[in-house]
Image: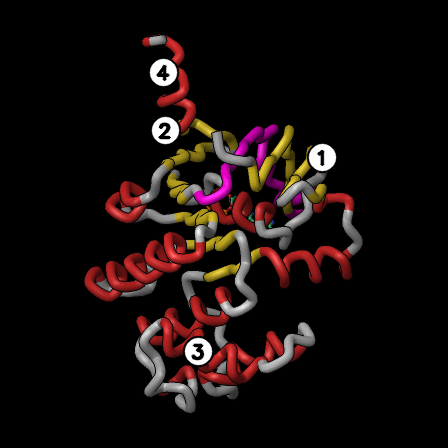
Amino acid sequence: MRNTIIELKSADLTLGNAAASVHVLRSIDLKIAEGEAVGIVGPSGSGKSTLLMVLAGLERLDSGEIIVRDTPIHTLSEDRLADFRGRNIGIVFQSFHLIANMTALENVAIPLELANVRNAFDIARKELQAVGLGERLNHYPGQLSGGEQQRVAIARALAPSPAVLIADEPTGNLDTETGRQIADLLFAKQQERGMTLVLVTHDTTLAARCSRQIRVASGQIAGDSHAEQTRLATVSA
Ligand SMILES: Nc1ncnc2c1ncn2[C@@H]1O[C@H](COP(=O)(O)OP(=O)(O)OP(=O)(O)O)[C@@H](O)[C@H]1O
Ligand SMILES: [Mg+2]
């Protein structure tokens, strides 16, 4: 049995104000093991992105616990949480979130510099070469294709060597073939580095490539292939 790297206990969250309040996460319990590739699926509005943001430490719970690498991150101050995130969690978004007036190299290197990493530009150059963008270092995001922009975002997420990579619909803005290449890249990096990958997708082919599939519905876990396997193993034992 592999070690648990992320654990949610009775996670509960309501978002919005009184006029538009939504109970987004309802008492979620979840354990993710080190090195797992988890694909989260579910209808629009079911709470997938919110769940990811909680796992990434970008959204606070109303109640419950979120433990990442043995650290109860819900107890950390904003500064410590930001520091923890920077060292342990990489995040990739559907719409890339690159800084328009920075080159590909700067998009990857500047966050490292801000985190006081030495040789930030050398590391950034290597990460960009590793995602196949060695010839695009000085291009601005607007001069790159969607797939290339997502490669820059992946290089940026991977540069601090995070233990966990979180991706919200990483192929959602890309055509099928480019999306497949980006998925290949994510899984290759996950294998190479023994990372834990948690992604949300509407693409059933991409979800099927993950070692575990979780279905979210109305803010709850409505299905979990891992729990299914455990149950069947128990039944047949
Ligand atoms: N800041 C907010 N204030 C109020 N409601 C919110 C807020 N953020 C999200 N919600 C609501 O919470 C629910 C879950 O949102 P979330 O973005 O997690 O869904 P999702 O499963 O990622 O959907 P999609 O597949 O469309 O991306 C939605 O009904 C949304 O309207
Ligand atoms: Mg979403």
Estimate the spatial distance between the alpha carbons at disc 1 and disc 2, rounded to whole Å.
Answer: 26 Å
Q: Earlier in the sequence, mark 2 or mark 4?
A: 2
Mark 4 residue CB less than 8 A from any atom of ligand 1: no
Residue where numbered disc 3 is placed: 126
Q: Earlier in the sequence, mark 3 or mark 1?
A: 1
Residue projecting furthest to the bottom: 138
Residue 204 showing in the rendered view: yes
Query: Measured from the top left, where is residue 182 in percent x and y?
Result: 31, 63
Residue where numbered disc 2 is placed: 225
Q: Residues within 10 Å of mark 1 (few under 14, many from 20)?
A: some
Q: Residues within 10 Å of mark 4 (few under 14, many from 20)?
A: few
Residue 178's image quarter? bottom left
The answer to if 17 sits in the magenta stretch is yes
> Label 1 sits on what residue type?
Ser
Query: Measured from the top left, where is residue 168 in percent x and y?
Result: 44, 54
Residue where numbered disc 4 is placed: 233
Which residue is at the front of the view, 85 or 173?
85
